[in-house]
Amino acid sequence: MSKEKFRVVVGGVVTDGKEILLGKKPETEDHPISGEWHFPGGHVDEDEEPGEAVLRELKEKTGLGADVHQILTVYNTGTGAIRILYHCEAESNEAEAQDDLEEAKWVGVNELGETLNDTAEEDSMERDEIQNFIEKLKKMPVV
């Protein structure tokens, strides 16, 4: 039995009030979420803590600083990676697509499922932890 090395990837469910940040990958042939909206993130470097990696990836991809609040879910992506999704709170709402993102946008919690419905993130939206988090966001007062 061969032991293949799993990659660890992180993503940020980044909030600013009741909105969540999404990034869109450009169309390419060699990426599993090419041309799709997703929670921004990327690979964890070898000597990096996952919580630090999500902050680095958010900065690289959107220019945003953020605070990490909690792990929302951890799962096997089925593509040779373990994914850790964090709830992060943005320091501002001025996200700008950078690095390997074509576009970045904020969506309301009620639009999230519609925007991600046909993407590779559908599997994370079906997770109870994410659904519970979204329901809590919907009930929170806007500050």
Image (spheres, rainbow, N blue to C red):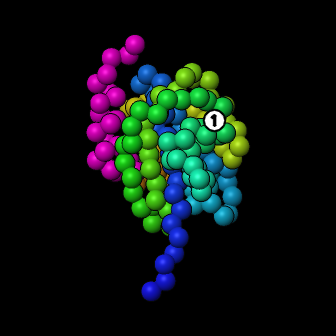
Q: Would residue 90 appear left or right of 126 to someone viewing this image?
A: right
Q: Position of residue 113 (x, y in %)?
A: 40, 42
> In this view of the protein, which residue sits in the foreground, 19 or 71?
71
In the rendered image, residue 26 lying in the magenta stretch gets the answer no
Task: Locate residue 21 relative to residue 132 in the image: left or right.
Answer: right
Task: Tell me which amino acid carries mark 1.
Answer: Lys
Q: In this orientation, does residue 23 appear? A: no
Task: Tell me the residue that label 1 is attached to.
Answer: 59
Q: Considering depth in this image, is 53 or 24 the residue closer to the camera?
A: 53
Q: Residue at x 46, y 59 (%)?
A: 82
Residue 15 visible at all? yes
Image-quadrant location for residue 132: top left
Give the residues drawn in magenta, as a range. Answer: 124-143
**Secondary structure state at the residue bearing disc 1:** helix
Specify the farthest residue to the front: 47
Residue displayed at 38% across by 32% down: 110
